[in-house]
Image (cartoon, coloured by chain):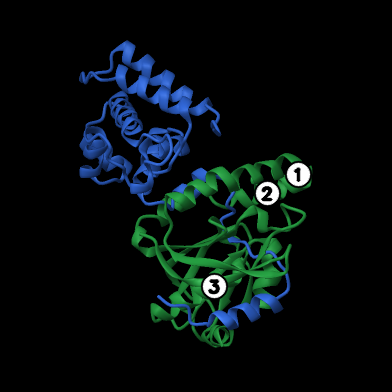
């Protein structure tokens, strides 16, 4: 793509135009908001570890589904999401779901949506505390019994409580 | 992928001289690093210094961007494109556009246009954030990119956007876009559109 205006004409316009603010659309104050625009292959910048976070995301969805006593098929139907994508979320480490899917899951399972966006890798976060908590959660929730054990239920409740109450760590 | 469109100029308000600025299609990790390390600390500092009424305004502006709307919109990432402006090896501005919106203006209603989801300049270029903003012209370069993309997509220069309150004069009085008034579906931010004729005038 080329600009339709010449460099010289553009200079004249910039020189002559009044000095006004030009911001439009989304106010860009929050890096997490911005990162929704970013391709997933840029998610590895800085300290971000999408794979570790997505392990916790998959575990969280799996345990939440089992708490509701739903099969994968039933959750996909009730949350109105693609069955194959739900399987990928639960079983493929590093899989990054679409924002709509995360929104639907957060709404149906009553989980904090912005935190889910970060856990899933759909938005980028450099929150080290969240990453550490996510990895511990994923490590402890590795079993896959049909019904949640009391220990699993406590683990799930504790992590959801943590996500709901955790304040974003800026650096 | 990020590709160089060309080298243009930004006016350094502090020296009165023009300086080279690179306009790119796309953004990369360098831009993200700039947002995180250079932009955000200044936004946060501004927020700390804000008066209560200013904070309310800022919060209102933030609130209009809700996650459910974003999640619904971002189903098709191919519909979106980013443009960045760099000078002095720093990101000076960013624009994100959506290529799936339609015109609301009588006479071209329903015709496809380039909708600007976000147009932002670096905090050090803004009057509202720093006392001596540095570069002028980021908005003009990015607007020209939106018009040029609209022509490339055969949308004939049509562009639409929701202006933040402090920028309405620029879109209405400087660019001459049509003011369609507050949009109740977008936190009452005013919606502006550029017609083909207005775009032709701006690229001459």
Estimate the spatial distance between the alpha carbons at disc 1 and disc 2, rounded to whole Å. Answer: 9 Å
Do residues under tags 1 and 2 come within 8 Å of each other at their CB atoms? yes
Identify the colour of chain A in the image.
Answer: blue
Residue located beneath label 1 in the image = B50
**Chain identifier of the residue bearing label 1 in the image:** B
Against B2, residue A73 (above or below) is: above
Quadrant where the C terminus of chain A sits is top right
Q: Nearer the viewer, residue B3 or A39?
A: B3
Q: Is residue A45 visible?
A: yes
Say which element carries label 3. strand
Say which element carries label 2. helix
- Quarter residue A150 falls in: top left
Instruction: Point out the tag, 1 or 2, that comes first from the N-terminus.
Output: 1
Residue located beneath label 3 in the image = B8
Left or right of residue B125: residue B79: left
- Quarter residue B122 falls in: bottom right
Residue located beneath label 2 in the image = B58
Q: Position of residue B145 (x, y in %)?
A: 49, 73
Q: Which chain is green?
A: B
Labels 1 and 2 positioned on one and the same chain: yes
Labels 3 and 1 positioned on one and the same chain: yes
Quadrant where the N terminus of chain A sits is bottom left
Say which element carries label 1. loop
């Amino acid at each position: 793509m080329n600009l339709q205006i010449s460099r010289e004409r553009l200079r004249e316009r910039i020189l002559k135009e009044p000095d006004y603010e030009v911001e439009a659309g989304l106010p860009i104050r929050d890096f997490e908001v911005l990162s929704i625009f970013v391709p997933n292959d840029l998610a590895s910048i800085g300290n971000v570890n999408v794979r570790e976070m997505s392990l916790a995301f998959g575990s969280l969805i799996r345990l939440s589904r089992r708490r509701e006593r739903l099969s994968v098929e039933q959750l996909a139907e009730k949350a109105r999401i693609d069955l194959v994508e739900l399987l990928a979320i639960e079983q493929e480490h590093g899989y990054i779901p679409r924002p709509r899917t995360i929104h639907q899951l957060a709404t149906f399972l009553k989980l904090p949506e912005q935190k889910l966006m970060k856990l899933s890798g759909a938005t980028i976060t450099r929150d080290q505390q969240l990453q550490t908590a996510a990895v511990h959660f994923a490590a402890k929730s590795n079993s896959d019994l049909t019904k949640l054990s009391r220990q699993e239920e406590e683990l799930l409740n504790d992590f959801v409580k943590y996500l709901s109450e955790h304040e974003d760590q800026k650096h | 992928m990020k590709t160089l469109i060309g080298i243009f100029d930004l006016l350094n308000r502090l020296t009165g001289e023009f300086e080279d600025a690179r306009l790119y299609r796309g953004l990369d990790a360098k831009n993200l690093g700039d947002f995180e390390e250079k932009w955000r600390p200044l936004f946060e500092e501004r927020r700390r210094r804000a008066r209560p009424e200013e904070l309310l305004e800022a919060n209102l502006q933030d609130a209009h961007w809700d996650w459910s709307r974003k999640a619904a919109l971002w189903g098709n990432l191919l519909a979106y494109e980013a443009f960045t402006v760099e000078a002095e090896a720093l990101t000076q501005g960013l624009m994100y556009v959506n290529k799936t919106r339609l015109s609301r203006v009588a006479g071209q209603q329903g015709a496809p246009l380039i909708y600007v989801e976000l147009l932002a300049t670096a905090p050090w270029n803004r009057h509202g954030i720093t006392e001596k903003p540095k570069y002028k012209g980021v908005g003009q370069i990015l607007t020209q990119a939106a018009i040029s993309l609209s022509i490339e997509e055969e949308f004939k220069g049509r562009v639409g956007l929701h202006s933040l309150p402090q920028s309405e004069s620029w879109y209405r009085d400087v660019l001459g876009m049509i003011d369609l008034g507050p949009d109740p579906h977008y936190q009452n931010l005013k919606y502006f559109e550029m017609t083909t004729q207005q775009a032709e005038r701006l690229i001459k």
